[in-house]
Image: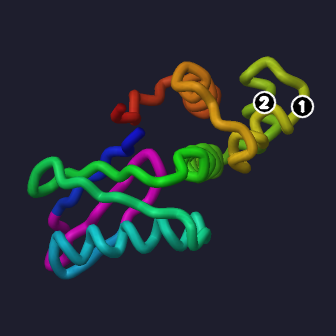
Amino acid sequence: MFLEGKVFKDGKFWLAEIPALDLISQGRSIHESEEMIQDAVLELINDPKFVLHLVKKSKQSFLIGCSQEDKLIALMLKRLRVKYGLTLLEVAKRLGSSSANSFARYEQGKAKPTISKLMELLQAIDPKIEPILKI
């Protein structure tokens, strides 16, 4: 699984963004902005065993993959839920459950969803969400 990112110029800085993680960083060059976004993801995951891979698609777009997809999926679910201002219980209710644990297990990386389940989880956060995964 890969998440898509993009790099663009804003004034004198280059910004690198991974929309699926609601994450953006900046640098003085494309390369520096990509390094900064990788550092940001690694800092948020905070696991020395976690290895992140950045693959260039073009000058201004890239894909990130990793050694532990469950941790990246957990980070994505949590950051998107927080972005939309939802509690665990609110998302669980949108999934038809009365227990926040049903969603929390995915957000904590204790359960790894299938692709179809992941799309269901993402739609519970935002029903209008665009496909954000690259497989």
Is any atom of residue 84 visible in this view? no
Disc number for residue 92: 2
Q: From the image, which quarter does the N terminus lie in?
A: top left
- Label 1–label 2 contact, CB within 8 A: yes
Where residue 38 appears, as percent x and y from the top left, is: 38, 67
Where residue 90 appears, as percent x and y from the top left, is: 78, 34
Specify whether 26 is left or right of 90. Answer: left
Q: From the image, which quarter does the C terminus lie in?
A: top left
Residue at the spot of label 1? 99
The amino acid beneath tag 2 is: Ala
Where residue 97 appears, as percent x and y from the top left, is: 84, 22
Residue 74 or 100: which is nearer the viewer? 74
Mark 1: secondary structure: loop
Q: Residue at x 53, y 46 (%)?
A: 69
Residue 31 or 20: which is nearer the viewer? 31
Mark 2: secondary structure: helix
Farthest-out residue, right: 98
The boundaries of the magenta stretch are 9-24
The amino acid beneath tag 1 is: Ser
CA separation in Å, label 1 and label 2: 6 Å
Q: Residue at x 70, y 40 (%)?
A: 106
Residue 22 colored magenta? yes
What is the count of numbered marks? 2
Q: Residue at x 52, y 25 (%)?
A: 115
